[in-house]
């Protein structure tokens, strides 16, 4: 039968192995893009975990892992200005068999039958296309 001290040692060993394994699996499961998003090096933290053991695992779990949780709330792709197509008639973005006027920023309610409007001609009564990219 195991005494109290042996149980504490076994619990400690399993705790250390659990933290070490959790850190290792978490590091290897992250994409390079995620690592770049938080400004850290995957290889460096892998080496820290492998060679420092429990202190490295604790440092990773307390300092680095929360950063991944914060970027999880953000879009996965970096925000870049999108280049929109020029104003004009385009196939309806929702797949309806018609053309819809794109004013350079937004889809408008103006529609036309396929082949019904000359390319580039604005719809009757439409406001002039806005500047692109928008100026703030």
Image (cartoon, grey):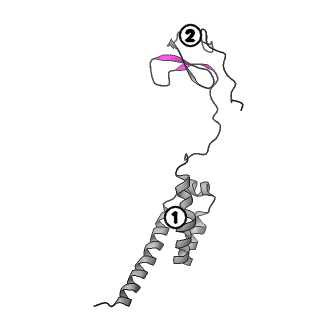
Q: Is residue 53 visible?
A: no
| SS label for mark 2 | loop
Q: CA distance from mark 1 to mark 2?
A: 55 Å
- Which residue matches tag 1? 27
- Residue at the front extreme, as displayed: 4
x, y percent for residue 114: 50, 13
On the image, the x and y values in percent for residue 76 come to 55, 47
The residue that appears at 58% across and 68% down in the rendered structure is 45
Is 91 part of what is drawn in magenta?
A: yes
Label annotation for residue 117:
2
Return the mark for residue 125. none
Mark 2 Cα-neighbour bin, 10 Å: few <14, some 14–19, many ≥20:
some
User: Which residue range is magenta in the image?
Assistant: 86-103
Mark 1 vs 2, N-terminal side: 1
Residue shown at 46% from the left, 77% from the top: 16
Tell me the quadrant of the picture where the N terminus can be found: bottom left
Q: Position of residue 82 (x, y in %)?
A: 63, 35
Image quarter (top left, top right, bottom left or bottom right) of the C terminus: top right
């Amino acid at each position: 039968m195991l005494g109290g001290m042996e149980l504490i040692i076994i619990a400690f060993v399993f705790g250390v192995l659990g933290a070490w394994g959790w850190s290792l699996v978490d590091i290897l499961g992250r994409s390079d893009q995620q690592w770049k998003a938080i400004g850290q090096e995957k290889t460096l933290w892998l080496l820290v975990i492998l060679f420092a053991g429990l202190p490295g695992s604790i440092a990773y779990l307390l300092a680095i892992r929360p950063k991944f949780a914060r970027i999880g709330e953000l879009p996965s792709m970096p925000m870049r200005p999108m280049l929109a197509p020029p104003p004009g008639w385009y196939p309806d973005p929702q797949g309806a068999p018609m053309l819809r006027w794109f004013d350079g920023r937004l889809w408008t309610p103006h529609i036309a039958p396929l082949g019904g409007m000359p390319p580039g001609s604005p719809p009757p009564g439409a406001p002039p296309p806005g500047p692109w990219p928008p100026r703030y």
